Amino acid sequence: MSAISKEIRSFLVVSEAASIREAAHRLNISAPALSRQMQILERSYGTRLLVRTAGGVSLTPEGALLRAEAQRWVDADAAFVQRLHRGDSGSRKLLRLGAMEGLVTPVVPALVQRLERHLGPVELDLVVGSNPLLHEKSEASELDVVLAYNLPRLAHLSIVDGFDYELGVCHAPDLGIEGSGPLTMQEALQWPLCLPSAALSMHTRLMAEILSVRVNPKVALNTNSIGTILSFLRDGHGIAFLPWPDVSQDVEAGRLAFRPIRSRRMTERLSLALCRGNALGDATGRVLDEIRAVIAGLEQAGPRPPYA
């Protein structure tokens, strides 16, 4: 929770963007909805804050004053939240982590174990969701760190590291797909698909690749839950295109197979981001280093077949 209104937070994003449309994309809301927020703000202050042109938006002198003041409010609110958490956590170190669903099982338990070896008892406040939810929580100063695919650059997030993973064809070992090497898209699309819905960041690019093959694949599942996709795959209901971290534990346990895609490079960028006004204090470096170490372990465990 934050004392700063959504209109003020949206205004700060608009002030850094080239247009309402770009700011709305960053905030994951429609451009008309964002315009209404800005109109509410202007009526509240009784003055124009933005100059709208065919080329985008710029701040009026009053808008520039509000931006400077609003940023001070946001910083003060974040500092207050930090003091509250330091006072409430006692001897336990609090980590407020936002992560996409597919990253929870391979990353979080190992991360907590590593942190407790170095920092002592850790209290984990974990938010699991897609990018829009993680953006909302981080913007409201409710998270310290975000780990997610394809994060945009936002004022309240500082992306400190990134890791690229190519999507592979994932399926149950006994599904009936021959061989163990790379598959073409045409070969993979002969099988029913378990697809991520539009709520997940990979959806648009993945659908563009599938449609470019000019086939009419059978869809077994369309969902915003990576966990549900993995469950369908284990039960032999089809194939999915997923990055290695999401399937690493299932592959290593023999429950799923992971096959590279021949002649195509569909890449997901896994970003590690530090939230503005986080409450980590002098543990910041250690937390980031341990997250990097866990992710490096996933990379070392991952498959390294040749890409044809």
Image (cartoon, rainbow, N blue to C red):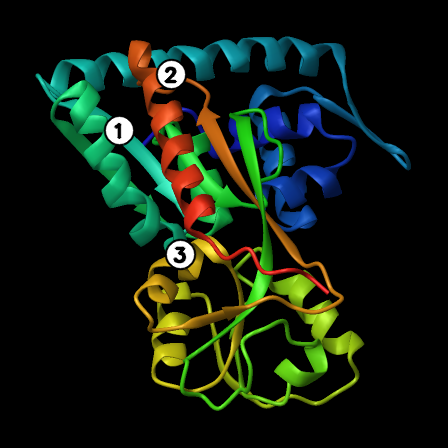
Image quadrant in which you'd find residue 102? bottom left
**Pointer 2: what residue?**
285
Counting from the top left corner in percent of width and height, residue 212 is at 79, 75
Q: Is residue 239 left or right of residue 206?
A: left
Q: Marks 3/2: CA distance?
A: 24 Å
| Residue at the image point whose x is 47% and y is 45% from the top | 299
Work out whether 135 lies above or below 158.
below
Q: Secondary structure at mark 3?
A: helix
Work out whether 101 lies above or below 43.
below
The amino acid on which the numbered mark 2 sits, given as a three-letter code, is Gly
Numbered marks: total: 3
Graded by Cα atoms within 10 Å as few (under 14), some (14 to 19) or many (20 or more), the crowding at tag 2 reads few
Most foreground residue, 23 or 85: 85
Work out whether 218 lies above or below 243.
below
Graded by Cα atoms within 10 Å as few (under 14), some (14 to 19) or many (20 or more), the crowding at tag 1 reads many
**Pointer 1: what residue?**
95
Most foreground residue, 210 or 11: 210
What's the mark number on residue 102?
A: 3
What's the mark number on residue 78?
A: none
Graded by Cα atoms within 10 Å as few (under 14), some (14 to 19) or many (20 or more), the crowding at tag 3 reads many
